[in-house]
Amino acid sequence: MKDIFKGQLVRLSAMDYEEFGRAYATWNRDSELMRLMDSGASVLHSAKAGKDFFEKMVEKNSPEHHFFSIRALEDNRLLGDINLDVVNNWLGRNAFVGIVIGNRADWSKGYGTDAMNLILRFAFTEINLHRVTLTVFEYNPRAIRSYEKAGFRHEGRIRGALLRDGKRWDMFFMGILRDEWISLNQ
């Protein structure tokens, strides 16, 4: 039996709120990262505000929400976080996934793809989901390629959903079904 939380490059672990608060206080100073993560305006937060946010988010945790930190296997350093939010109260067995690799020095090294593969394994083998969906902005081709490598397919778009730098950008919906994931991982 494989360790479901350990991949080739990363492992998923429980969140340490203080560590995350400090990390996000650093990461949210990178306005490019914030623009890739969120459609809202970039806002700076203190380490304490970050810690409080994560504590509250996970405190109201229910069986529908799964939060993990992403750690490098080579040195156990914190790379980012990944989460699954099950929608429809388990009736449709669908979830949305969100991921961030916080430090630019760790981008384009396969960490995000490996973490996504782990969360999909968790989603489809542990909590028996049918579908995992995500959204991504048109101006984030690195993430789109990573999601495609993990098996996600383009399912739709909201045209002109976001105004950035005086230009309208689309938001893409991508998804993967359990049967597709099983076919890719046999």
Image: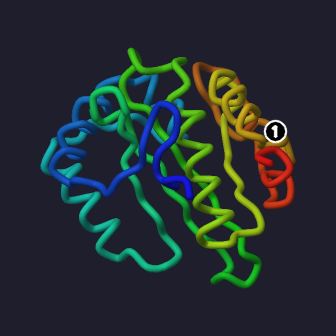
Q: Is residue 94 left or right of residue 103?
A: right
Image vertical order of residue 148 relative to residue 174, above or below: above
Residue type at mark 1: give it.
Arg
Q: Where is residue 132 drawn, in percent x and y?
A: 70, 58
How many numbered badges does the structure rendering display?
A: 1
Q: Residue at x 76, y 78 (%)?
A: 92
- Viewer-closest of 43 and 2: 2
Q: Is residue 142 left or right of residue 171?
A: left
Q: Where is residue 141 drawn, in percent x and y?
A: 69, 22
Q: Residue at x 63, y 31 (%)?
A: 163
Residue reaching furthest front? 1
Q: Where is residue 164 drawn, in percent x and y?
A: 59, 26
Q: Where is residue 65 drawn, in percent x and y?
A: 48, 69
Q: Disc 1 on helix, strand or loop?
A: strand
Image vertical order of residue 123 relative to residue 111, above or below: below
Q: Quadrant of residue 42?
A: top left
Q: Which residue is mark 1?
A: 159
Colour option used: rainbow
Q: Residue at x 16, y 41 (%)?
A: 46
- Viewer-closest of 12 and 185: 185
Q: Quadrant of residue 96?
A: bottom right
Q: Is residue 12 left or right of residue 43?
A: right
Crowding at mark 1 (Cα within 10 Å: few <14, some 14-19, many 20+): few
The quarter of the picture where the N terminus appears is: bottom right
Q: Residue at x 85, y 59 (%)?
A: 179
Image vertical order of residue 101 relative to residue 20, above or below: above
